[in-house]
Image (spheres, rainbow, N blue to C red):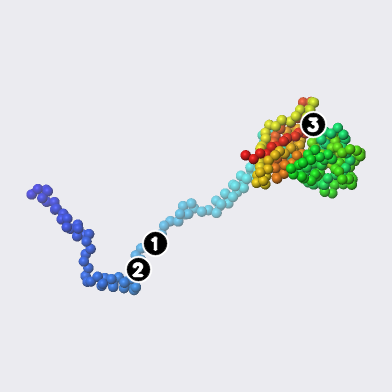
Amino acid sequence: MSKEDSVPVPNPDDHLGRLLIEPGNGAWFSSLYLSLKEQISPPQLPPLELTSKPVQVQDMWGLYGYNKRAGLWSLVLHVSAIALAFALATTPVVQTVLQKTAILVAPDIAAYVSKAPRPGGGGDGSPLPASRGRLPRFASRQFTPPAAVVNNPDPKLIMEPTLVLPLDANVPNVDMAQYGDPLAPVGPSSNGQGAGGGIGNKGCCGGVGDGVGPGYSTGTERPGPPVYQAGGSVTRPVVIYQVEPDYSDEARRAKVEGVVTIYFEVNERGLPQNLRIFRPLGMGLDEKAIEAVLKWRFRPGFKDGKPVTVTSQIVITFRLL
């Protein structure tokens, strides 16, 4: 008998029989009835009996052997380390070394500190001296300087002239219809021999008097740092960094275009200061122009090889793209 004859041959019908559902005893509705009965009223099972018992294991914290003295020693070591570090840091030797190696940063914030308005002055280079007249209204900001003689008879936007002075400032004034210097002699209307707008004989920058600024100078104030005009031995400031002004929403909707003329000073550090609108455009563009110029940086003007404060003028052009 060969080895192949001893291996039983599987019957394919046996495998197929395992896949078929064995026929139950009874009709199908009997099986359905039993299933519904178990769903509605399941049979009561006997109580569960536990045959396993918990096994006692060793506590995991017991591996370290807790000791109260260990916590006390830890506290003592930490306090001692902190005290030692503080003592070393406060010794004269360490302080001396730190003073030699530490770099102290003291930012220059003078350009961002609010300053009181300086005595004012102005003019338009007229050959006649400034004429006598009343002062305009006092305000905290100036957009239009006063003028005894209006050089622009047809402005696009009329704004009331103002002087940058406290509302309760005690300054002389006269009851006259025209603007001017209350202390000037009576004569023909003239803005004076100064510069930068305003009324004055040797001042600058939108005020009234012989000082510098948008306020009023009576000639009795303590003089501030000298401010020069470019020309002769005084060189003109040069722009080394500039920012383009943004368009205001009001001007963009109204499609306003034009130029804004600004008079200002460039101090010894190349920073613009005392900005004043000489020729406004309105619709928020004047404020946008000032905001942009305040971010500009200049190479300052020089006199006798030293940087000085020099007056300047810039024209900002606004064009819709």
Q: Nearer the viewer, residue 142 or 237?
A: 142
Quadrant into which the C terminus falls? top right
From what the image shows, is residue 196 above or below residue 50?
A: above
**Number of numbered callouts drawn:** 3
Under mark 3, the amino acid is Gln
Quarter of the image holding residue 214? top right
Foreground residue among 238 and 83: 238
Q: Which mark is residue 48?
A: 2
Q: Is 297 situated left or right of 180 in this image? A: left
Badge nearest the viewer, 2 or 3: 3
Which residue in the structure is indicated by mark 1? 54
Pointer 1 or 3: first along the chain = 1
Q: Considering only order in the chain, which callout, 2 or 1, is on the residue closer to the N terminus? A: 2
What is the x, y in percent for residue 162? 80, 44
The image's mark for residue 148 is none
Task: Name the secondary structure under disc 3.
Answer: strand
Query: Residue 41: image x %, image y %?
Result: 34, 73
> Can residue 219 be seen here?
no
Disc 1 secondary structure class: loop
Q: From the viewer's perspective, is 215 left or right of 269?
A: right
**Near-viewer residue (67 or 238):** 238
Identity, as a three-letter code, of the amino acid under mark 1? Pro
Image coordinates for residue 51, horizontal then vertical, percent:
34, 65
- Report the Cα–Cα distance between label 2 and label 3: 107 Å
Relative to 3, is 131 on the left or the right? right
Q: Disc 3 marks which residue?
A: 229
